[in-house]
Image (spheres, rainbow, N blue to C red):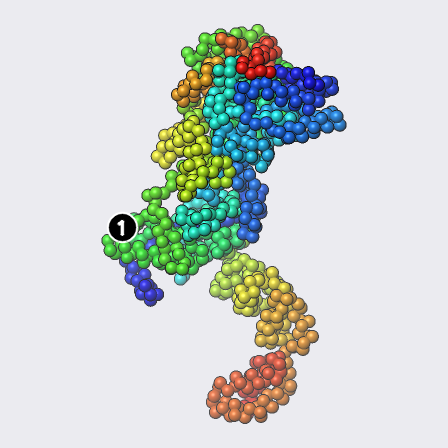
Amino acid sequence: MTQTSAVGLIDAILERYEPVIGLEVHGQLLTRSKMFCSCSAEYIDAPPNSNCCPVCLGLPGALPVMNRVAVEFTVRTALALDCEIPEFTKFDRKNYFYPDLPKGYQISQFDMPMSHDGHLTVSVDGEEVRCGITRVHLEEDTGTLQHAGDILQQARSSLVDLNRCGVPLMEIVGEPDLRSPEQAREYLVRLRQILVYIGVNDGNLEQGSFRCDANISLRRRGDTGLGVKVEVKNMNSFRAVQRALEFEIVRQGRLLDQGQTIAQETRGWVEARGATIGQRSKEYAHDYRYFPEPDLPPLQLSREYVERVRAGLPELPQQLVERLRREHGLSAYDAALITAERDDARSFEALVAAGVPAKAAANWLMGEVARLSRETRTALSQSGLGVRGLAALISLVEAGSINGPTAKQLLEELYLRGGDPGAVVRERGLAQVSDTEEIGRIVSSVIEANAAAAADFRGGKEQALHSLVGQVMKATRGRADARLVNRLLRERLSG
Amino acid sequence: MSELTTAGLSVTAMAGLLRSGQASPQDLAAASRGELDRIEGLHAVLRRTGELAERQAARAARLLAETPEAAGPLCGIPFAHKDVICLEGVGTSAGSKILESFVPPYTATALQRLLDAGAVPLAVTNCDEFAMGSSNENSAYGPVGNPWDPDRVPGGSSGGSATVVAAGAVPFALGSDTGGSIRQPASFCGVAGFKPTYGRVSRYGLIAFASSLDQIGPFARTVEDAAGVYSAIAGHDPHDSTSSPAAVEPVAAELRRGVQGMRLGIPREYMGEGLEPGVRQAVEAAFAQLEKLGATLVEVSLPTTDAALSTYYIIAPAECSANLARMDGVRFGLHVDRASLTDTYLQSRDQGFGPEVKRRIMLGTYALSSGYYDAYYRKAQKVRTLIAAEFDSAFETVDALVCPTSPVVAFEKGAKSDPLSMYLCDVLTIPVNLAGLPGISVPCGVSAGLPVGLQVIGPRFQDGRVLRVAHAYEQATDWHSRLPGPVPGVTA
C-alpha cells in the first residue's frame, strides 16, 4: 500500500472506529549496581558476562539483596506521576524458562506494587489528555541473547550475555486512556522527559533502556465497551510507536470492516517492513505462577521515607516551563523547546544568569547550538566551549562587538576545541566594523565597481542589493555591521 | 601420633587435646579421616575436601601456636557438611545427578564462618536429593546406612551428617532442616541435632529447597557442642535478606541455668496414636526426668497440628518448583544436548532429577497454577499463619514445648515405599518449620536397640532457651554418650 492510500485509509477507518491505546513502559534505573547484587549495572560497553556474580548468574544457593537506590528511584518516579504509595509492598516470582533468565523466574511485583493510581497529562493539538497510570513497580531485567539465526527456536546456536541480567527495571503501566497514535507518542515523550528530569533513567530508546509496549484495540465510534486488544512490541523509537499504532489501526479496521474478529495476540513491529507481525497467541500464553518471593521480606515504606523522597524531587518539566515563562517571559513554544532536554534548560538558565538576554539565549540554544550538538554528538555542557564560552560569545554579539555571521563561524570553530571568544576576536581582528565613515568609503567604491548591479537596484530590482552587500562584506572580511551596510547602500543608491 | 583415636570425641574434648598439646589439628584431621574410612560402608560421605582440609588444618595449627588466646573453640576441629552447602572449589551436588559436575565458585556464609573460626572441613555428606526426603533413600548416589543398624535408614534428609557424628567419625557436622531434616535424623541416629530459629543462620550458599522453611544447623555429640557451633554460624548476613539483624544472644551462660522453675508444655496432639510404644515410653521417661530436674510439665493443645503436613506439602513444593527452575541444563550441571531448546530443558531435567524431586516440582507447579492458587497456596499460607499463632499463644503459658522428634525409630531401608507414609515421618517436626521456631532433638532412650529423640521447641529467637532445656536433660542422662559398635561387614 502506498503512503497516500494508507493515509486516506486510516482517516476513513478513524471515522468509523475509535482506537483505545494503553502503553507499558520499561525503564532501566540509573543505579550504579544491579538490583540484587553489587555487580556494576553497566552492560553496554562491558565485555560479555564480565559484570556477573553468583547472584545475578542465578547459581544454586545465591540470594537476592534489595538495592535501596532502585527502591528510591521507583518511589521518586511514582511521586512524579502522582501515584499513591502504599506503606506495604512485596516482591513476587514470575516463573518461566528462558536462557536469558538464569533463575527460571524473574523477581517482579504482582498484586502489591510499589505504587498505583497516578496520572500524566499531555497536550496534543491544544487538547489536554489525562492518562491514568495504573501502577509503577520494580523488577529485574533479563540477560541478552545473540542468535545465530533469526529467532531462538530456529537458531543453530545462541550466545547468552548476563551482564544486563539483574539491572533494575521499572515498569510503568498506563491506563487505556489514549485515543490516537499522536497522543501515544506525546505520552511517551513526556514520560521519558520526566524520567530523565528526575534522574532515574537515561531515556535511550535505541539502546533499550527505555522500552515501550503498546496495547491497542478498536471500537465503533460511540461504543463504550472495549474491543479485543493486541499487544505490540519491538518499537525502538517514538516514530516507530506512532507508525506501529497507525499500522494496527489500519489492519484491525480492515478486519473489522470485513466482519472478522481480532485475534488477541502479541505482534512485533518490523521496522524494515513497516508492519507488525504476529508473534505468539495469547491462548498459549504462559501461566507465570506468581507467588511471593520468599527470599525478600516485604518492604515497609514509611510515610516519613516517602515524604523525604518527595522533598528531594527536582523541578518537573511542566513546573520548569511555567517558571521560565514567568521569570523570563519566554513564549510557550520557546519554553517547551528549551525544556525538552533537561540539559538545555540548565544551559539556558546559566546563560541568562551570565547576563545573556533570555530571547537571545533561547534562539542560540535552539538554533546553532542544537545543530552543532547534534552534528558533533556533544552536548553544550560537554563541549570545549561550554556554557561560559557561549555566554561570552553571545555577549560579544549583543554588545555589537562582532556580527552574527562572525559569531556563528566562531561558535562552529570553538564548539569542540574551546577557547575564549573575546581573545580570538582580538587576535584575529574579527571585531565588527561599525565606523560609518570607513564603511561609507567601501560602499562608495563597491557601487563604483558594480555599476550594473547599482543600476538594476535603482531600476527597482531589490535582489541586486544582496550582491552589493556581499561585496562590502567581502571587502571587510565579513566584519562589517550588516545593518549599517544595508542602510548606507540604500542611502547612496537612492541619493 | 598414629595411636591417637578420636572416635566419639566431642568438640570440647578435641579442643582439650589441642590446648594441652596432645594433638595437632593435622593429627585430629588424620584420625577423623581414618574414622571416616572405617565407616565407608555406610556411604555417609560423598566427597572428601582434599587439599583444602590440609590447608585449613595447617592454618589452624598456626593460629593455635601464634595467637592461642584469639583462637576460638572450633579452631582445629574437624567436621563434615551436608552436600547442599556450597564450598568454593569443592563439588556440591545436593545429592542430585543434575548437579554432579557443579563446583561452586563461592562459599556459603555458614561454612565461611566455620572456616574463619579455624574449623577443618573434611567431608561432604550424603543426603536426600535437594534435601527432599526423610530416609536418605532419595539420594541419587545411593542410601546411607544407620550406624546402629546398617540395614536401617539414618533418617533424612541430612542422613549423612547425622551418621558421621553418630558413628563418632567427626565431632560435629552441618545439616539443613526444612521440615525436620536435622532433628529427625538426629533422633534416628542418637545425636543432638539443632534447627535454629528461621533467620538466625544465613542461608546464603545453601542450595534452596524451600526458602521460607530452610535453615542450616549443627549435629553434635553434645548440646554444648551444638550450641558452640550455632554461636559460630549464627548472626546477620548482609547477603541473606531473611537473616535477622538482631544480635545473637550469648548461649554459653544460658546453657547452664537448668530447668528449675521452668514450665514445659507437652502438646497433646504430638502424643497421639501414631507413636510407637517404645518412643512413647522413652519420651515419657524423659518428661519425668525433666520434672525431677525441677521443671513443671503441663499439657497444652495445638489443634491445627493435623493441618500442618498438608500445609507443608503445598508451600514447600511450591517454593521448590521455582527454586529448582535454575537447574535447566543451560549454564551449569547436567546438560543433555538436544536440537531444540525445549527438548534440552526437558531432557536435562528428566535425566537430572530423581522421582521424588519431580513429584514435588509437579505438586508445587500445580499448586501455583492459575485457578488453583487460591485453593492451595493462598489457603496454605493462611493455615501457616494460624499454626504460628497457635505456637505463640502456647508460649504465653509455657517456656518451651517438649515432645517426641519422630513418632517412629529408624525403619528398614525400603520399608516406606509410598510417599505419603514417608511424609508422615515428619509430622512432629514440620510445624516447627512452618512457624519458624527453634527446635532440637536429643537422644532420650532406645526402642528395640534403636535411638529415640526428645524434641524441645521454643519461641522464635529463644534459641538459647531450647538449648538450655536440652542441655539440662542431656547432662542428667547418658544416652548421648553411647557409641554404636563397629560397622558390620566393614573391617577397621
Above or below residue B309? Residue A182 is below
* Residue A96 in which image quadrant: top left
Observer-nearest residue: B149 or A21?
B149
* Residue B352 in which image quadrant: top left
In which quadrant of the rendered image does the N terminus of chain B lie?
top right
A11 vs B115, left or right, is left
Q: Position of residue A419 (x, y in %)?
A: 66, 67
| Amino acid marked by disc 1 | Thr
B59 vs A42, left or right, is right
Q: How many marks?
A: 1
Tell me the residue that label 1 is attached to: A261
SS at badge 1: loop
B360 vs A31, left or right, is left
Residue shown at 58%/37% (left/top)?
A: B105
Query: Can you name the residue that lies furthest to the left here?
Result: A259
Observer-nearest residue: A86 or B437?
B437
Observer-nearest residue: B34 or B133?
B34
Residue shown at 53%/64% (left/top)?
A: A374
Answer yes or no: is residue B183 visible. Answer: no
Q: Position of residue A17 (x, y in %)?
A: 29, 56
A399 vs A113, left or right, is right
Residue shown at 54%/93% (left/top)?
A: A451
Answer yes or no: is residue A3 visible. Answer: yes
Observer-nearest residue: B392 or B432?
B432
Residue shown at 56%/83% (left/top)?
A: A470
